[in-house]
Image: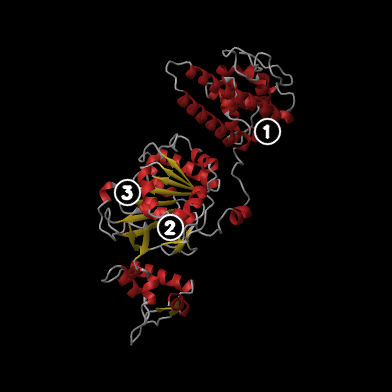
Amino acid sequence: MDEPRPAAPHHDDHSRPRPFDDLTAVPPHDADAEAAVLGACMHDSAVVDAVRNLLDGPDFYRPAHETVWRTVLALRGEDKPTDPIMLCDRLREQDDLERVGGAAYVHRLASATPSVSGATHYAGIVRRMSDLRRLRASGLRTVQRSMEPGADPDAIRSEVETEVRAERERALASGQGRLSRFITDGWSFVKETGADTEPLWGTREKTVWGSGESLMIVGAPGVGKTTLAHQVIFARIGLQETVLEMPVAPSRRVLYLAMDRPKQIAKAMARRVFPTDEKILRERLVVWEGPLPATLDKEPDLLADLAAAHQADTIVIDSLKNAVSTMVDDSLAVAFHNARMRAIRNGVEIMELHHQRKATADAPRGQRPSLDQVYGSTWYTSGAGSVLFVTGRAGDPAVTLHHLKTSTGEVGPLDVTHDHVRGTTTVDPTKDPAALLRNAPNGLSARELAAILIGGGDPERADIEKARRHLGSLVDSGLATKADGMAGGAGGGRQARYYASARHLTAVG
């Protein structure tokens, strides 16, 4: 086995890349720099902590050096010395000692470093050579693909872009930046990362779509989830202010990924578009028609890149099944969530339209669904910030919205009515707690409101508690007042009652 020279690291003539080298020449590497790094780590185990932030195992060109490096890391992880004696003993236990060149070679490596203090500089050389080897390998693959019979330029271009993207991500996620890429101090995290931002849709007490958290709208075909989503989009670009009587925050620009039947999506949008909207639609809404260049589980950066390319701060995925390779694979669901989080980290808000399992498509209106009725891996909903589930029959104007996963307080269930001609959705006032309280001159108790919301009968404890939260929210927002009840006794107790406030009555009067 070759032995390193105990001198200052330099680029060997045979390894220095030259523009017109034969493509079959020895790949870029610096054996002296590799030996100097390993020698420094053997002299001072504390050096390992600084160097490990710069190097990964494959960055070493010589397999023996990679084996020694991984063994050094293992010893350091066990808080044991990394000197040549300990290193040889561990390599012997692993049956690797002779393979790396024997004890004599390990001791020569220990004497190969010119300066322990220069270890990070030597590691930088090793890392640079490794990066060049990766780029060179990618270039060789491109040349080979271009020379194959029937080579497709578009396919090659897509593969090259994928490799460059992967290389960029590897560079960011390893080496010096690997342990600090997403680090921020505690004060900045709590006060500056959006924890105190206004919701995108809803109120602070009842948030349907929170900033920095994706919103997933689920339902069977024909129940109006697209109709609802389009109203939120139009509110985001300034064509309306509220949806279902809840405020929607404005957006700079929306990118709509119309992957599932774009013509039908256009027809659905046309119901809400008028000639006076042309300027806003041209400037603040951009639509991608058809399949993406790659699925998001294959290219996790694609979502963020699309948003950056089109200067969009909101992306609508219609629909989720068209954005990934398969919906039932947990690993692909996690990969999609990585794509989702990378876009969100870049300041992009995400809305996803999705389907329910077919077996649950004909559930009775008003029957509360559950998250396990959402089609695909559970990790899709686990990673979403908020999940709205629309139940009803296809084409039925009256459907129910269930808030299955919440950011703050639960919204609904809301009985709503779609106007399929105008493309609008309104809340059924007979199930709106605020409207019910406003029309109850003698006020309502939590039990009375619960009985109305469930359609009559004796409400369960959970129903009463939900009604109590609804009424409490109205009190907190100044739309209701509360008269405290009285504990039971010989004459019986009295439940707390809630009354519409003068402000609420005046606002609608």
**Label annotation for residue 382:** none
Give the residue pinned by disc 3. 356
Label 3 sits on a secondary structure element that is: loop
Vertical placement of residue 170 versus 35, above or below? below
85 sits left or right of 324 in the view: right
Q: Residue at x 57, y 14 (%)?
A: 23
Give the x, y percent position of residue 207: 46, 60
Label 2 sits on a secondary structure element that is: loop
142 sits left or right of 177 in the view: left
Can residue 145 be seen in this snapshot?
A: yes
Q: Nearer the viewer, mark 3 or mark 1?
A: 3
Kindly give the residue lying farthest to the bottom in the view shown: 491
Say which amino acid is labelled 1: Val
Give the residue pinned by disc 2. 406
Give the residue pinned by disc 1. 47
Say which amino acid is labelled 3: Gln
Nearer to me, 345 or 180 = 345
Q: Residue at x 53, y 32 (%)?
A: 165
Say which amino acid is labelled 2: Thr
Q: Residues under labels 3 and 1: Cα distance?
A: 54 Å
